[in-house]
């Protein structure tokens, strides 16, 4: 997993943004996700138990690879 910074952005006073950090540990995020899936199923929505894997078409993969090289990141991950 990749850590990232997430903030709730609300309209503050004088139309300025009001930022509130969202602090959520990995385990808490997984528990929240499980609750959401359970509630979706209870509401009658179908949720696949196996992950859905998608692959970009060749031209999109080339664009992704090129953007990684231009950014100096190196090679993009691909399967």
Image: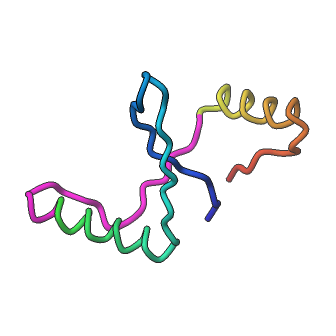
Residue located 91% across and 38% down the image: 72
Report the side of 78 relative to 21 (left or right): right
Residue 52: x %, y % from top left: 42, 55
The question of residue 44 being in magenta is answered with yes
Q: How is the image coloured?
A: rainbow
Residue 36 location, x and y as percent?
A: 26, 63
In the image, taking residue 29 as reference, residue 4 lies left or right, namely right
Tell me which residue sits at (84%, 45%) in the image. 75
User: In the picture shown, does residue 39 fall above or below 76?
Assistant: below
Tell me if 67 is positioned left or right of 47 in this view.
Answer: right
Q: What residue lies at 62% left-to-right and 54% top-to-bottom? A: 4
Position of 13 relative to 29 (above/below): above
Quadrant into which the N terminus falls: bottom right
Q: Name the quadrant containing residue 56.
A: top right
Q: Residue furthest top?
A: 15
Decide whether the magenta segment is chiefly helix, strand or loop.
Answer: loop
Q: Is residue 40 left or right of residue 5?
A: left
Quadrant of residue 41 within the rendered picture: bottom left
What range is drawn magenta here? 41-56
């Amino acid at each position: 997993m990749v850590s990232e910074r997430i903030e709730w952005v609300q309209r503050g006073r004088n139309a300025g943004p009001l930022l509130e950090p969202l602090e959520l540990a990995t385990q808490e995020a997984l528990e929240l996700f499980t609750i959401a899936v359970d509630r979706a199923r209870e509401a009658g929505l179908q949720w696949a138990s196996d992950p859905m894997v998608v692959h970009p078409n060749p031209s999109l993969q080339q664009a992704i690879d090129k953007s990684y090289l231009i950014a100096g990141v190196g090679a993009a991950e691909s399967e």
